[in-house]
Image: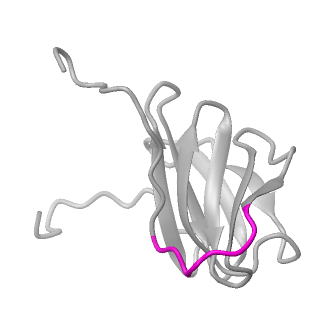
Amino acid sequence: MDGTMRTVIIQEKIYWPCGLSIDYPNRLIYFMDAYLDYIEFCDYNGHNRRQVIASDLILHHPHALTLFEDTVYWTDRGTRRVMQANKWHGGNQSIVIPKSMRLCFLQSPVPAFCTGA
């Protein structure tokens, strides 16, 4: 865990990465960039990268994200909101919590994916 055997997954068009969530059933990694204002996903090797949302009108300072079923949730430190959208195409955006403290983390309930858990 000292970084000597690290694997770079994303190295292009990424400036200020924050928020990371793993979609285990679909074997995808969701992440966002607080400077470039986007939410994207890719496979475990960094291939098949796709944008979910890319707009500074919607994302003012995204900070944390989590997934539940077909929905992505994120905190926005600029608007102090918790938002949600469809995790595949970014549609059906809505406000979950209109004003909150500056939340740094989100966690959704997920089943145990470990064998025998």
Residue 47 image-quadrant placement? top right
* Whole-percent x, y for residue 35 in the image: 65, 83
Residue at (56%, 37%) from the top-left corner? 68
| In magenta stretch: residue 4 | no
**Which residue is located at x 64 percent, y 47 percent?**
72
Q: Is residue 88 left or right of residue 114?
A: right
Colour mapping used in the image: one colour
Q: Position of residue 37 (x, y in %)?
A: 72, 74
Our reading of the magenta stretch's main secondary structure is loop
Count of numbered circles on the image: 0
Residue 1 visible in the displayed image: yes
Magenta residues? 97-104
Residue 65 placement: quadrant: bottom right
Rendered-image quadrant of the N terminus:
bottom left
Point out residue 15 in the picture as x, y percentages from the top left corner: 57, 81
Give residue 24's position: percent from left, percent from top.
43, 31
Q: What residue is drawn where x is 31% and y is 57%? A: 7
In the displayed structure, 112 sits above or below 13; it is: above
